[in-house]
Amino acid sequence: MWEPIRGCVALAAGLMLGLVPMLPGPSSPSTNLNVVAAQAADLGRAGFPAGQTSISFSDLDGWAADDHAAALQAFARSCAQMTQRPPRTRPAGVEGDALAALCPLIDDAADDPRSFFEKHFQPVRIEASGRLTGYFEPRVEASFERTERFQYPLHARPPDLLELADDSRALGINDEVTWGRATADGFEAFPDRAEIMAGALDGQGLELVWLDNPVDAFFIHIQGSARLAMTDGSVQRLNFAGKSGHAYTPIGRTLVEQGEMALEDVTMDALRAWLFDADPEARDNVLASNRSYIFFALSGDTDRDAGPIAAANVPLTAGRSLAVDRHLHTFGTPVFISSPDPLPGSNEPLRRLVIAQDTGSAIIGPARGDLFIGSGEAAGSLAGQINQPVTFTLLVPLNPGG
């Protein structure tokens, strides 16, 4: 939670609720960030890349029945970025240059998108247990000015927040550590959520917009993006612009550990209800237990059919954009996801071609995915119900001339 170089932070409901294993946070803001990075490597990525098996398209149950045109449209959005700059190839992923080389062929694929994928890609199944959750883009009211009603800020990226380049090991810093504060003495931890709630950023003019309650602000941090109905009548998109660099902790786990909820009762709606009903001090203590803090940038709502800008710097496509572990997978990769369980509202097992376009702090592992569901309350309700086993099959590019 990505992390992403840019784009939204895909943090799924299952992660929020503590239903998926999470990393321990550092004990204090001065804790060595390399230690946190080493924990991430040990818990999430040791031994990767996972085993992979080449299969045929006929081995993919549900492949023929899928909407390949919808997948091609999402892939085309990635191509708009990849033709300018091929994505960085990752250890368990496909070659970024090979993906970009297929982009010029898309214009001829509109009449038969299924054949495009079958002709130019080889299915390769990842032999690892997987888990799929969902995320969405909230829609809330907001104000550019602080008022009696709108008292809770969302912040722009601070000028001293540093995102390390992919070659950060050359600086002697573990490449799992991607965010921190640039100081005269070097790279150090940034203030965490509790410190920012206590005023660590006050007086710096970083408040982008103001919301009317801290719960909506927190859930926007969790999702990493939002669509804002402003009091001046405009509609704005709120996109990820950076993060504090602290480990993400699900507040559902916090409430279970405090004895406030039983694990089986933890849902997104239950969390929101608890936060709204709690006294302010108890609420703020629970919110502060998630030390990770997200910063944002504003853009106009120019394309209402598209989702927010993802980590791959492309607009998300509802139902076709997947957040993956960016340390393992190459952005732009088509991934066929299979699950014996249907998505909410469906009676059929999940079988769908999606595109790896986003990432998240807690999206860790070769077959860990977070599916973008869309914008608004209905999408949020659906996203909050997704937490199911999944199998990843990567579509690996063949020679463009093949």
Image (cartoon, rainbow, N blue to C red):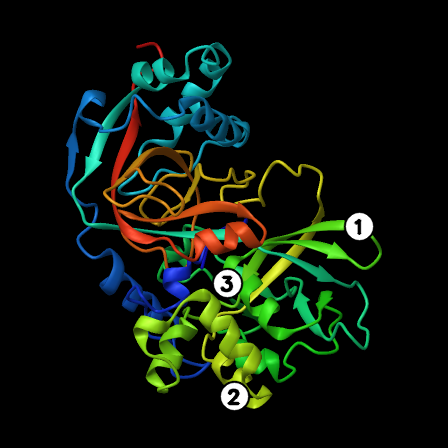
Eye-nearest disc, 3 or 2: 2
**How many C-alpha atoms fall within 10 Å of the one at disc 3: few (<14), some, or many (≥20)?**
many
- Image coordinates of residue 68 in percent, x first then y, are 40, 23
- Image coordinates of residue 12 in percent, x first then y, are 42, 57
- Residue of label 3: 222
173 and 112: which is toward the camera: 112
Mark 2 lies on a secondary structure that is: helix
Question: In the orientation shown, which residue stands out farthest toward the right?
Answer: 232
Which of pointers 1 and 3 lies earlier in the amino acid sequence?
Answer: 3
Q: Is residue 115 left or right of residue 280?
A: left
Q: Residue at x 29, y 19 (%)?
A: 398
- Image coordinates of residue 95 in percent, x first then y, are 33, 31
Q: Residue at x 46, y 56 (%)?
A: 2
Distance of label 1 from label 3 (alpha carbons): 24 Å
211 lies above or below 5: below
The disc at residue 234 is 1
Q: Is residue 64 left or right of residue 323?
A: left
Which quarter shows the C terminus? Answer: top left
**How many C-alpha atoms fall within 10 Å of the one at disc 1: few (<14), some, or many (≥20)?**
few
The disc at residue 282 is 2
The amino acid beneath tag 2 is Ala
Which of pointers 3 and 2 lies earlier in the amino acid sequence?
Answer: 3
**How many C-alpha atoms fall within 10 Å of the one at disc 2: few (<14), some, or many (≥20)?**
few
Q: Is residue 127 left or right of residue 40?
A: left
